[in-house]
Image (spheres, rainbow, N blue to C red):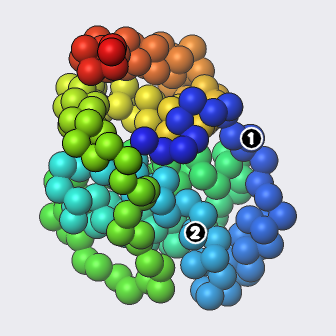
Amino acid sequence: MHPRVGSRPQPSEPTEHERLWLGRCQAGDGAAFQPLMRPYLAGLLALARRHCRDPHWAEDLVQETLVRAFRGLPAFRGDAALRTWLYRILVRLASEPQRWQRSFRAEPLDVDVPDGLGTPAADAAMARELQDRLDEAMERLTPRQRTALHLRAVEGMDYAAIAAVLACTPVAARMHVLAARRKVLDRVREHLEP
């Protein structure tokens, strides 16, 4: 699991670092795109893996998200946090895989997509078993519930940001998270009890 699971939601205010690189990107500096996107790559890849069973398609989904973000950055107004905007692009693309997979043409971007997201647990067999059950439980969720739970539990987003990604109300986002938690807990409960 990600070290931030269960931590408080992260604020949506842009950092000084983000403002600097975003300004440079919007001014036409293509070299500023990589430092702007780097902090979000692991989160984007983790969310993409929740939507794609094939890790290669997950990487392609992240790549396509980055291409769309690169093209859309000049028009980015900042109505939502950059992270929320990126996740929204990814979720929209994930909901229409036949559209972006069919027309996927890899455009070179000088951005590395990380291969791994964490370190193995001390007790690898038990951790792998629990992870398998968790992944199976997540697969059984609706795409909206899966996305909402991932954004809340792994990315630490607040309900307003989740609502912006899912294009729903904060109350509906909270309901998606609660329903997903309940379903996942029911599925993995036997592995959590001593």
The amino acid sitting under disc 1 is Pro
Q: At 41% across and 71% down in the image, what residue appears? A: 113
Q: Is residue 136 at least partly visible in the picture? A: yes
From this viewpoint, is residue 68 visible? no
Q: Is residue 194 left or right of residue 79?
A: left
Image quadrant containing the C terminus: top left
Judge from the rendering whether residue 3 lies leftward or rightward of residue 61; answer left or right: right
Q: Which mark is residue 114?
A: none
Q: Residue 110 location in percent, x, y?
A: 47, 85
Residue 74 horizontal side relative to residue 146, left or right: right
Q: Return the x and y of residue 88 as percentages of the image width and height.
A: 48, 46
Q: Position of residue 175 (x, y in %)?
A: 47, 13
Disc 1 designates what residue?
A: 11
Q: CA distance from mark 2 to mark 1?
A: 17 Å
Q: Where residue 94 sits: x, y (%)?
A: 30, 48
Residue located beneath label 2 in the image? 37
**Label 2: how many residues lie within 10 Å, few (<14), some (14-19) or many (20+)?**
many
> Quick one: label 1, few (<14), some, or many (20+) residues within 10 Å?
few
Q: Circle 1 sits in a helix, a strand or a loop, which is it?
A: loop
Q: Amino acid at mark 2?
A: Met
**Disc 2, SS:** helix
In front of the other: 155 or 83: 155
